[in-house]
């Protein structure tokens, strides 16, 4: 079975709003693997929300914590890990993921991202300007990094089960 052949952590990378956390949770349930979310782990470790971390300590500090949290989770064995949209852009964090895990780039068109991030306002990077324009720019800037993931899966609008099935097919 597929589950038995998964010997490395599976790390979901891609833009904010693409559904890494929701898809990751469903995938973990189906594959009976533990699930972790890097953003949640950082918030727990810092006992602060991500916007608070950005406000009080800045993005550099956040990226540092993000790298440490991801490194620790990758070392803890097979499982599904959802990362924040900027994690795979950092050379060090990306190197670590490419070296020790299976990276899956979860991708969607701009409209889908806009619709999904619109639901909550927890992204500090979208505060300073027009969120649609910022997402559009980040999507273009980050593509060369995301493209380095060995697997590329399109996230469907609507329920995530279809996307989870696509990931399972891509892994097989
Ligand atoms: C970020 C994405 C966020 C979070 C932080 C920075 C980014 O995670 O890590 O706000 O740089 O794209 P999501 O991708 O889960 O929104």
Image (tube, helix red, strand yellow):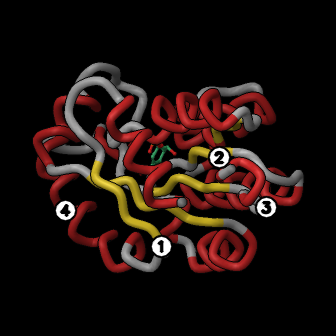
Q: Closer to us: mark 2 or mark 4?
A: 2
Residue 125 vs residue 116, the one in the foreground: 116
Q: Residue at x 58, y 79 (%)?
A: 91
Q: Which residue is mark 1?
A: 149
Tell me whether circle 1 and circle 4 mark residues in contact (CB < 8 Å).
Answer: no
Provide the secondary structure element on which disc 3 rests.
Answer: loop
Name the N-terminal-most of marks 3 and 1.
3
How far apart are labels 1 and 4 at the CA level? Answer: 20 Å
Q: Which residue is mark 2?
A: 81
Provide the secondary structure element on which disc 2 rests.
Answer: strand
Name the N-terminal-most of marks 2 and 1.
2
Specify whether 62 is left or right of 47.
left
The answer as to whether callout 3 falls within 8 Å of ligand 1 is no
User: Would you identify the image quadrant in which residue 32 lies?
Assistant: top right
Query: Mark 4 Cα within 10 Å, few/some/many (few <14, many 20+)?
Result: few
Q: Closer to us: mark 1 or mark 4?
A: 1
Residue 52 vs residue 5, the one in the foreground: 5
Q: Residue at x 47, y 29 (%)?
A: 22
């Amino acid at each position: 079975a597929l589950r038995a052949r998964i010997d490395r952590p599976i790390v979901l990378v891609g833009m904010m709003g693409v559904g890494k956390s929701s898809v990751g949770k469903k995938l973990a349930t189906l594959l009976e693997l533990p699930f972790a979310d890097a953003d949640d782990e950082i918030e727990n470790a810092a006992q602060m929300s991500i916007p608070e971390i950005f406000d009080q300590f800045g993005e550099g500090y956040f990226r540092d914590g993000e790298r440490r949290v991801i490194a620790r989770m990758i070392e803890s064995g097979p499982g599904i890990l959802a990362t924040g949209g900027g994690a795979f852009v950092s050379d060090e964090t990306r190197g670590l993921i490419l070296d020790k895990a299976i990276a899956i780039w979860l991708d969607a068109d701009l409209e889908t991202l806009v619709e999904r991030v619109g639901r909550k306002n927890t992204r500090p990077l979208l505060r300073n300007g027009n969120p649609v324009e910022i997402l559009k720019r980040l999507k273009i800037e980050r593509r060369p990094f995301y493209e380095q993931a060995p697997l590329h899966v399109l996230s469907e609008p609507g329920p995530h089960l279809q996307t989870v099935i696509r990931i399972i097919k891509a892994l097989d």
